[in-house]
Amino acid sequence: MEKVPLALDVDTGVDDACALLLAARHPRLDLRAVTCVGGNAPLPDVVRNTATVLDVVGRDDVPLAAGSPRPLLEHPVDARHVHGADGMADLGMPSPRHPLDPRHAVDLLKDTIDAAAAQGTPLTLVPLAPMTNIALLARMHPGSFARIGRIVFMGGGAQVSNATAAAEFNVFHDPEAAALVLDAAVEHAVPVTMYGLDVFYEPTLTRADAAALIASGRPVAVFAGRLIEFLCQRFHAETATIGDAGAVASLCDPTALRTQRLPVRVELMGSWTRGRTIVDLRDWTGDLDHDPHGLAPAQVDVALGVDGPRLARLWLESVGGA
Ligand code: BDR
Ligand code: CA
């Protein structure tokens, strides 16, 4: 099978770290770049955490660049109550050695997209964080945005929310960016898959899995096990989701994900609904034809079902293996 050339945009983040480990190790994936954005933690912490993961996994060949420290319009809000004070499980890791690419994240993405397109293997872009960098890319380098093969983003939800009663964290954190990316995807005919909260919580591991990873003594497995153990402790649970890593796992095993092509809008107003992804699940033409808003132009492959155990096993075998 051909490898999938991809770039990750992250706000590392415990589950972003899980996603990076998989993207860096799985034989089906060709990780070409990683870019950072403020989100789960302030940007300097995100960059340090991401560099740490790339060190652990021994991928000093992968360029890493810093992007936007804040959303387009919103004030920065972090999620350290979930991810720990340092944004990545407070494991006391040594200072990373992985160098920071001098390019801005937007320019690294542009160069990576253009190079992949020139080789005839368009890049899969995987935003796992507020989509500020991707929105800036769309505006600054529309030609390169148009050359993206596919966007698979973690964000939103058809029926499930977390940051507010209506909205998911990544989209709520920068709703303008998410709206702009969907808009640009329509304009440039870039296919989009939304790996949202409807499936996000389903690939899970147990405390016992974490213990086995740690007991293996292999550095990548030990690190992975400590991330899972942190999440179990934080939520006082026997299991933890691999979160963002599920989106990456679905690239390795696409049939584990059930998607439906649906119109999606991002709510930018609303007293209580700002940042909600409005996924149009209606199927009666009577309603659709008489809707004063008309159908949303963005047709997104929305993940509505997942074989969670299969993706969790895929992650475990990849990060736990020799
Ligand atoms: C998303 O928000 C962050 O906390 C996670 O890393 C994930 O990308 C889930 O809403
Ligand atoms: Ca994330």
Image: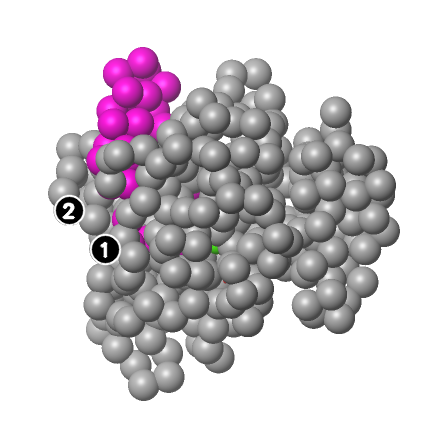
Based on the picture, tell me whether residue 111 belongs to the magenta stretch.
Answer: yes
Q: Nearer the viewer, mark 1 or mark 2?
A: 2
Q: Amino acid at mark 1?
A: Leu
- Asked if 217 appears above or below 156 in the picture, the reply is above
- Label 2 sits on residue: 139
Q: Is residue 103 left or right of residue 282?
A: left
Q: Nearer the viewer, residue 313 or 110?
A: 110
Residue furthest out toward the bottom: 271
Quadrant where the C terminus is found in the figure: top right
Q: Quadrant of residue 113?
A: top left
Q: Position of residue 165 (x, y in %)?
A: 48, 79
How is the rendered protein coloured? one colour
Based on the picture, tell me whether residue 16 belongs to the magenta stretch.
Answer: no
- Asked if 143 appears above or below 86 in the picture, the reply is above
Residue at 45%, 23% in the rendered image: 61
- Label 1 sits on residue: 180
Separation of marks 1 and 2 at Cα, in angstroms: 9 Å
Residue at 29%, 47% in the rendered image: 67
Please tell me how crowded label 2 is: few (under 14), some (14-19), or many (20+) other residues with Cα within 10 Å.
few
User: SS for tag 1?
Assistant: helix
Q: Nearer the viewer, residue 276 or 86?
A: 86
Magenta-drawn segment: 105-133
Residue at 32%, 15% in the rendered image: 120
Quadrant where the N terminus is found in the figure: top right
Q: Is residue 190 visible?
A: no
The residue at label 1 has a CB less than 8 Å from ligand 1: no
